[in-house]
């Protein structure tokens, strides 16, 4: 992997979004330079499919081609993560198997300073150490300078407020540049943490971006959380990402929950309590530690064995 700084002024990132041009006004003064890999996995780390959904939106909006795929037979238990059967427009049936792929730009420019790569997959069922080692080997092969993990958690947050984002890094330079936290969480983790540790051991720094999904509306999709993840991702990678219909979908999602709450007094009262708690956290007197603590409480609940498909009640 090439040596060099991981932060730089606004560089040109080699990703083509045919329908939109990058808007320099929304980009930060510092961005991660070099090739960046953005990672999202379906499963334990992906409440409301927000992380995987956000990254698929990036892939579909850009011009990407598959570069690398893990051996699904080696890492997945198909009784636990089953293949999906679909029927095409021509009436033919086909199977889609769980797996993990890395995608890269279809073309690279000679004058490009960096490129954005994507890794999308399903959390593996076994052999996590070998899986992480294989992923890190792929990172080194395409000269990745930094990795950004996207995740989503069920949390005690109201749908009526902006989605809480918790961003952290073990790298001091990245924390200082982007005003990130350093997570103090101890407990069970998902595959993102395993890959992050393996990458760190070979000198590839990581940023983790997590969105808080209201636990009482945990069913996928969660467009408002997807939108929040994309906005934070833009800050880190320095690229304006096209939204498509996501803004309208997020507004419709919120209106739909408002309508449900209007017919349920208990739900409305509970949301009001969450709103009050959130407004307290957002007050000028509160620090970023409050969001970090909520993030850690979520992971501890997951460690207690509660399913990510089940809402958590106080």
Image (cartoon, rainbow, N blue to C red):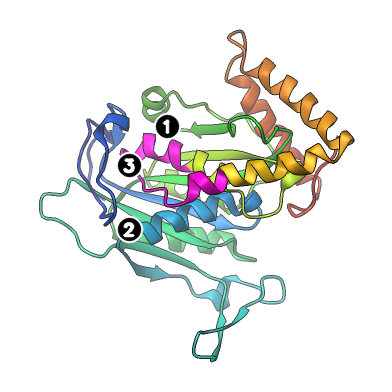
Residue 3 point in image, percent of width and height: 23, 42
Labels 3 and 2 touching (C-beta < 8 A): no
Looking at the image, residue 146 sits to the left or right of residue 181; the answer is: left
Disc 2 target residue: 62
The numbered dot on residue 26 is: none
In space, the residues marked 1 and 3 are separated at their CA atoms by 24 Å
- Residue toward you, 132 or 95: 95
Report the magenta stretch's main SS: helix
Looking at the image, residue 61 sits to the left or right of residue 228; the answer is: left
157 to 248, vertically: above or below: above
Name the N-terminal-most of marks 3 and 2. Answer: 2
Residue 132 point in image, percent of width and height: 50, 58
In space, the residues marked 3 and 2 are separated at their CA atoms by 11 Å
Labels 1 and 2 touching (C-beta < 8 A): no
The numbered dot on residue 240 is: 3
288 to 149, vertically: above or below: above
Labels 1 and 3 touching (C-beta < 8 A): no
For the record, the magenta segment spans: 230-250
48 to 295, vertically: above or below: below
Magenta stretch: includes residue 238: yes
Disc 1 target residue: 171
Q: Would you call the spot at circle 3 few (<14 residues within 10 Å), some (14-19), or many (20 or more)?
A: many
Kindly identify the residue that appears in the image at 26 percent across and 53 percent down. 15
Residue 44 point in image, percent of width and height: 66, 53
Kindly identify the residue that appears in the image at 56 percent across and 77 percent down. 97
Q: Would you call the spot at circle 2 few (<14 residues within 10 Å), some (14-19), or many (20 or more)?
A: many
Identify the element where label 1 is drawn: loop
């Amino acid at each position: 992997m090439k040596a060099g700084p991981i932060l730089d002024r606004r560089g040109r990132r080699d990703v083509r979004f045919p329908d939109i041009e990058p808007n320099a006004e929304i980009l930060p003064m510092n961005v991660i330079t070099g090739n960046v890999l953005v990672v999202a996995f379906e499963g334990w780390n992906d409440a409301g499919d927000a992380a995987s959904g956000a990254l698929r939106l990036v892939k579909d909006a850009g011009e990407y081609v598959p570069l690398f795929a893990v051996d699904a037979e080696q890492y997945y238990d198909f009784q636990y993560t089953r293949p999906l059967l679909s029927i095409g427009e021509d009436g033919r049936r086909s199977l889609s198997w769980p797996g993990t792929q890395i995608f890269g730009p279809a073309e690279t420019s000679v004058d490009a300073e960096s490129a954005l790569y994507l890794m999308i997959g399903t959390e593996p069922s076994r052999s996590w150490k070998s899986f992480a080692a294989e992923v890190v080997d792929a990172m080194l092969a395409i000269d990745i300078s930094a990795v950004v993990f996207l995740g989503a958690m069920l949390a005690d947050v109201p749908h009526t407020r902006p989605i809480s984002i918790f961003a952290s890094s073990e790298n001091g330079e990245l924390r200082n540049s982007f005003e990130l936290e350093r997570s103090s969480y101890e407990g069970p983790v998902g595959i993102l943490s395993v890959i992050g540790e393996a990458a760190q051991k070979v000198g590839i720094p990581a940023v983790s971006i997590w969105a808080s999904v209201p636990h009482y509306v945990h069913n996928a999709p969660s467009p408002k959380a997807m939108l929040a993840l994309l906005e934070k991702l833009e800050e880190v990678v320095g690229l304006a990402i096209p939204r498509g219909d996501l803004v309208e979908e997020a507004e419709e999602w919120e209106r739909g929950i408002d309508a449900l709450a209007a017919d349920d007094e208990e739900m409305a009262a509970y949301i009001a309590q969450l709103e009050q708690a959130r407004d307290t956290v957002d007050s000028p007197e509160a620090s970023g530690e409050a969001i970090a603590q909520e993030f850690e409480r979520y992971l501890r609940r997951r460690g207690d064995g509660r399913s990510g498909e089940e809402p958590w009640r106080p």
